[in-house]
Amino acid sequence: MLELWALCPRAKCARRNTCKGDARICIEQLARHTPLAAREFIVDVLNAREFGYTPEQAVRNYFADRETESAAREAVPAARS
């Protein structure tokens, strides 16, 4: 999703236009080249996959969690100084 294969020094990844190694290692090594929000998204999806979710379920869960967090923040009145 982040197309880190384009930045990867491994020829195998660049040739196949996909990560052919451990995606977590690539994220750690190439993270400085990607936006923080994108990295967080990918890590959350990878974590969900480890718990047996399909990629589609993992993405849906990610956005559902963000909507829940946003709704919770809106429901809490702003703190007064």
Image: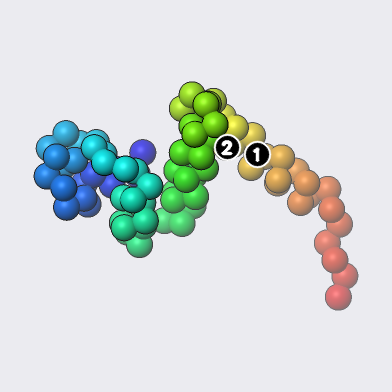
From the viewer's side, name the closer residue of 81 and 30.
30
Residue at (85, 66) in percent of width and height: 79
Left or right position of 80 against 22: right
Residue kind at label 1, given as amino acid type:
Asp
Q: Residues within 10 Å of mark 2 (few under 14, many from 20)?
A: some
Q: Position of residue 48 (x, y in %)?
A: 53, 35
Q: Is residue 58 visible?
A: no
The quadrant in which the N terminus is found is top left
> Which of 74/9 is in front?
9
In this picture, is 58 found above or below 80?
above
- The colour scheme is rainbow
User: Residue placed at 65% from the left, 39% from the top?
Assistant: 65
Where disc 2 sits, the SS reads helix
Labels in figure, total: 2
At x 24%, y 37%, the residue is 20
Residue in view at x 59 percent, y 36 percent: 63
Q: What is the x, y in percent for residue 8?
A: 21, 50
**Residue, disc 1:** 65
Q: Disc 1 versus disc 2: distance between alpha carbons?
A: 5 Å
Residues 70 and 14: in front is 14
Q: Which residue is mark 2?
A: 62
Residue 13 x/y as whole percent = 19, 40
Depicted 60 relative to depicted 13: above or below: above
The quarter of the image holding the C terminus is bottom right
In the displayed structure image, the side of residue 28 where residue 17 appears, left or right: left
Is 40 left, or right, of 72 in this rendering?
left
Q: Are marks 1 and 2 in contact (CB under 8 Å)?
A: yes
The answer to whether residue 48 of the structure is visible from this angle is: yes
Q: Residues within 10 Å of mark 1 (few under 14, many from 20)?
A: few
Q: Is residue 1 above or below residue 79?
A: above
- Amino acid carrying label 2: it is Tyr
Kindly indicate the quadrant of the structure image that contains residue 77.
bottom right
